[in-house]
Image (cartoon, rainbow, N blue to C red):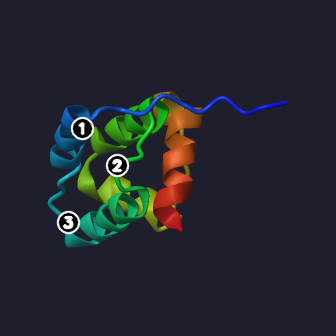
Amino acid sequence: MTEVAAPMIDERALSKLRWRCRRGLLENDLFIERYFNRKGEHVSVTQAEGLTALMDLADNDLLELLLRRKEPSGEIDTAAVREVLAELRT
């Protein structure tokens, strides 16, 4: 059985996403920058959705998730968020 590759976002969408991911806390920026350095231009639509949901959080709430002090809950507890969060944490 062959695995179907997830659709990737285009260059313009990636540029907008990177801009959207700029944070007020340096600690959050470090996690996010490392993520983009590893991913390069290969961010899937699902990953972009997860990142966008995380960027809707306040900086301190995001940092709590990144540092594993909390886990996603409520409407942010989605497969896309958990996937991106796992990658951000590594």
Q: CA distance from mark 2 to mark 3?
A: 24 Å
* Residue assigned mark 3: 25
Kindly state the secondary structure of the residue where label 2 is placed.
Answer: loop
The kind of residue tagged 3 is: Leu
| Residue 9, horizontal then vertical, whole percent | 35, 32
Up-down relation of residue 4 to residue 82 (above or below): above
Q: Which mark is residue 11?
A: 1
CA neighbours of label 2 inside 10 A, class few (<14), some (14 to 19), many (20+): some
Along the viewing direction, whichever of 56 and 13 lies nearer the viewer: 13
CA neighbours of label 3 inside 10 A, class few (<14), some (14 to 19), many (20+): few
| Residue 27, horizontal then vertical, whole percent | 28, 71
The kind of residue tagged 2 is: Glu
Q: Which mark is residue 41?
A: 2
| Residue 82, horizontal then vertical, whole percent | 56, 44
| Residue at figure coordinates x 44%, y 62% from the top left | 66
Q: Residue furthest front?
A: 2
Callouts 1 and 2 close, C-beta under 8 Å: yes
**Labels in figure, total:** 3
CA neighbours of label 1 inside 10 A, class few (<14), some (14 to 19), many (20+): few
Task: Left or right? Give the position of 81 relative to 14.
Answer: right
Task: Left or right? Give the position of 25 relative to 51.
Answer: left
Query: From the image, which quarter does the C terminus lie in?
Result: bottom right
Work out whether residue 28 can be spotted. yes
Kindly state the secondary structure of the residue where label 3 is placed.
Answer: loop
Mark found first going from the N terminus, 3 or 1: 1
Work out whether residue 70 can be spotted. no
